[in-house]
């Protein structure tokens, strides 16, 4: 059974176009430059990031971000400490900034059997975006984590490594987005993730998984990473539109 009700494709594209700026290139043709970044996976001091939520938000805004989700690592030990604090930071910062700050969490390295319970708990504690730390080849994530995250209807399965075609098909069915990552190590399987997503129709998003200020990226670099993952030009806009849709559904805290 599908987890989410999607808005129509046309609505998604219409929302995305609102964030585009048209201009003319040197050949006089109309070009479209996408100048905004939507990043749905970052970390703050509340887990292993380097910055306070306030500084992360400020730095992201200054370099042109439009929306930023703060998704600190949580397990059963810290979930009740971290999530309400991120939600409070997002609520206050959103009153004073044009940047849309989304309160989230990344459920990380927990036994797959309790992922569903923690997904529900993250939402009940005030976060509007749930990421699950997928089976990256850079870390010994417990096998079965990808499947458990998809069955639990997380919003995003981050760095899903060598995700199976069956799991990608279930991700499409359940409306769980698969992540292309700009982060060292996690990005090694971007090509595989892109291939199975395109084969199954699963939605892709691109995120930075920022821990340090220098991990934040431009839209231009995000586009280059998508191209390097083998995603055709015609599908790149759709990846950004997927992030826009998730940010819109999450709303403002
Ligand atoms: Zn992660
Ligand atoms: Zn992360």
Image (cartoon, rainbow, N blue to C red):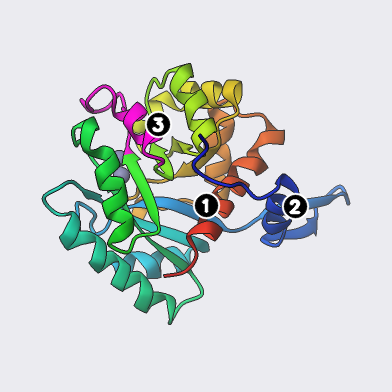
Indicate left or right for 4 with 72 as reference: right
**Residue 151 in view of the camera:** yes
State which region is magenta. 133-153
Q: CA distance from mark 3 to mark 1?
A: 21 Å
Q: Classify 235 as above or below 57.
A: above
Instruction: From the top left corner, tell me how far across and down residue 232 is, in percent.
Output: 66, 29
Q: Residues within 10 Å of mark 3 (few under 14, many from 20)?
A: many
Q: Which residue is mark 2?
A: 32
Q: CA distance from mark 1 to mark 2?
A: 22 Å
Q: Residues within 10 Å of mark 2 (few under 14, many from 20)?
A: few
* Residue sitting at x 35%, y 29%: 146
Q: Which residue is mark 3?
A: 187
| Sequence-wise first label, 1 or 2 | 2
Q: Which residue is mark 1?
A: 246
Quarter of the image for residue 236 reads: top right
Which residue is situated farthest in the right direction here?
A: 28
Q: Secondary structure at mark 1?
A: helix
Q: Classify 66 as above or below 129.
A: below
């Amino acid at each position: 059974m599908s987890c989410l009700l999607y808005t129509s494709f046309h609505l998604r594209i219409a929302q995305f176009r609102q964030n585009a700026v048209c201009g003319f290139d040197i050949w006089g043709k109309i070009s479209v430059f996408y100048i905004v970044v939507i990043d749905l996976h970052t970390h703050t001091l509340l887990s292993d990031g380097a910055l306070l939520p306030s500084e992360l938000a400020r730095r992201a805004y200054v370099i042109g971000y439009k929306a930023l989700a703060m998704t600190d690592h949580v397990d059963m030990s810290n979930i009740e400490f971290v999530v309400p604090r991120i939600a409070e930071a997002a609520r206050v910062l959103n009153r004073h900034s044009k940047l849309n700050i989304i309160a989230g969490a990344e459920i990380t390295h927990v036994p797959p059997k309790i992922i569903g319970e923690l997904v529900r708990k993250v939402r009940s504690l005030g976060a509007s975006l749930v990421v699950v730390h997928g089976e990256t080849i850079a870390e010994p994530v417990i096998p079965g984590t990808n499947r458990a995250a998809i069955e639990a209807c997380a919003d995003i399965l981050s760095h899903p490594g060598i995700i199976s075609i069956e799991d990608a098909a279930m991700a499409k069915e359940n409306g769980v987005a698969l992540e292309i990552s700009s982060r060292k190590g996690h990005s090694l399987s971007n090509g595989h993730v892109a291939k199975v997503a395109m084969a199954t129709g699963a939605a892709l998003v691109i995120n930075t998984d920022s821990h340090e200020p220098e991990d934040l990226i431009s839209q231009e670099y995000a586009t280059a990473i998508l191209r390097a993952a083998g995603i055709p030009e015609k599908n790149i806009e759709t990846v950004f539109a997927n992030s826009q849709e998730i940010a819109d559904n999450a709303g403002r805290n």
